[in-house]
Image: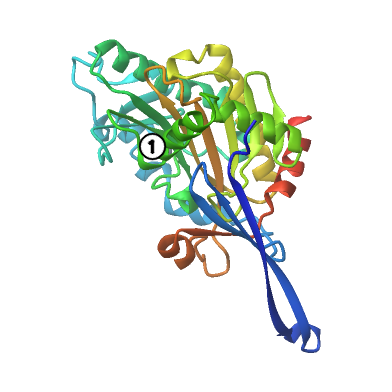
């Protein structure tokens, strides 16, 4: 089984430390590259993580229910509808969850799904029960799109939870994308799996990645049945990255109701961990082909997001935006051990 392309190099910085009588201090920096994702990352184990929970009222006060387009008084008046050929009712509904077209679309097919009529759901209340209707309307929508047979091949379910992660509204909502072409990052994952298979007699990159990570016992959090949960070798965010991969599921439509139940139970555990560690925000994406593609196993990522107070400093900076490298003061192997405790509960 071939190594999957994780590269690590160690470099050392030196300075005279003003907090230690100007004695010489050495700091270790790990340069990591993940050839599957193309992510380059610098793990800085000497840096502390954000320790205080941000004041949620800062966001809640500025975004009251009365001004929220997803809250009940404004909702029907201000949210777009689908054309009748897609759904005669104009929107996909499951209980209070509702999926409708994005008024500011990023793609030909970009929709928004509110989880419920609840204006704000704190991270520790994102239970499988509160999330399920929102994911169900996404599934209903994808099934309808497939039924219409328009030749779309790729889809994703995405989440900017709260403003530090780019959420424009605090009312919890998912976003879906359906397209003929994969997004740039999905394309990278597919291309990596194709090259791996070409070089390794058709072997599955995802199968081997999981097997190698499981054996290494460094970043493999657990398997909850069909889903393997891992921390990423080279995270896409300062606070690390949590990955989930559905074993042998090569299309969105391979996912059963039970697979979604398993996913939401795992997500709730990750969110409990984030809540306990003072986070209030994350990005999530679930990537899937809409037609079986043997080079792709349905998978997803969660990247915790934060601002650094007191200035509300962004967790993105020139290194990520302009040099395509992530500065990560979170050690993935430590994040894995911490998350394991939550999955054991
Ligand atoms: Zn609202």
Residue 25 location, quadrant:
bottom right
Horizontal side of 307 relative to 95 (left or right) equals: right
Determine whether, in the image, residue 132 is placed left or right of residue 83.
right
Q: Mark 1 CB in 8 Å range of ligand 1?
A: no
The N terminus sits in image quarter: top right
- How crowded pointer 1 is (Cα within 10 Å; few <14, some 14-19, many 20+) is rated as few
How far across and down, in percent of the image, does residue 83 sit? Answer: 18, 21
Judged from this view, the residue extending furthest toward the bottom is 22
Question: Residue 104, relative to residue 61: is it above or below?
Answer: above
Residue occupying the point 53% across, 27% down: 131
Numbered marks: total: 1
Relative image position of residue 22 (x, y in whole percent): 77, 89
Q: Picture quarter containing residue 87?
A: top left
Q: Quadrant of residue 175?
A: top left
Question: In the image shown, does 232 or 267 lie closer to the viewer?
Answer: 232
Vertical position of residue 220 compared to residue 201: above or below: below
Asked if residue 268 can be seen in this view, the reply is: no
Residue carrying label 1: 187
Question: x, y (%) of residue 279?
Answer: 62, 50
Which corner quadrant holds the C terminus? top right
Closer to the camera, 311 or 316?
Answer: 316
Q: Residue at x 44, y 19 (%)?
A: 251
Query: Ligand 1 quadrant?
Result: top left
Task: Please name the colour scheme applied to the rendered image.
Answer: rainbow
- Seen from the viewer's position, the closer of residues 180 and 76 is 180
């Amino acid at each position: 089984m071939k190594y999957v392309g994780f590269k690590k190099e160690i470099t050392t910085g030196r300075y005279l430390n003003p907090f230690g009588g100007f004695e010489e201090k050495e700091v270790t920096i790990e340069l990591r590259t993940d050839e599957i994702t193309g992510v380059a990352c610098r793990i800085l184990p000497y840096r502390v993580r954000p320790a205080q929970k941000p004041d949620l009222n800062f966001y809640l006060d500025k975004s009251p229910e009365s001004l929220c387009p997803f809250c009940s008084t404004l909702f029907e008046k201000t949210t777009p509808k689908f054309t009748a050929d897609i759904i005669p009712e104009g929107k996909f509904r499951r209980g209070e969850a509702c999926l409708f077209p994005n008024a500011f679309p990023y793609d030909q097919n970009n929709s928004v799904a509110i989880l419920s009529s609840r204006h704000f759901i704190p991270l520790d209340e994102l239970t499988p029960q509160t999330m399920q209707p929102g994911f169900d309307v996404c599934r209903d929508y994808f099934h309808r799109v497939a039924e219409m047979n328009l030749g779309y091949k790729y889809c994703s379910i995405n989440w900017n939870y709260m403003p530090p992660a780019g959420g424009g509204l605090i009312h919890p909502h998912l976003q879906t994308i359906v397209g003929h072409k994969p997004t740039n990052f999905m394309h990278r994952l597919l291309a990596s799996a194709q090259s791996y298979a070409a070089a390794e007699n058709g072997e599955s990159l995802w199968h081997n990645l999981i097997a190698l990570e499981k054996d290494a016992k460094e970043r493999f959090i657990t398997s909850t049945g069909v889903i393997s949960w891992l921390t990423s070798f080279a995270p896409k965010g300062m606070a690390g990255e949590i990955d989930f991969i559905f074993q042998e599921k090569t299309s969105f439509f391979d996912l059963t109701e039970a697979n979604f139940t398993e996913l939401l139970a795992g997500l709730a555990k990750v969110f409990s961990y984030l809540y306990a560690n003072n986070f209030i925000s994350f990005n999530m994406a679930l990537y899937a082909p809409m037609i079986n593609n043997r080079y792709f196993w349905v998978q997803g990522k969660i990247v915790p997001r934060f601002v650094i107070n007191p200035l509300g400093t962004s967790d993105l900076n020139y290194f990520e935006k302009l040099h395509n490298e992530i500065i990560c003061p979170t050690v993935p192997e430590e994040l894995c051990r911490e998350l394991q405790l939550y999955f054991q509960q």
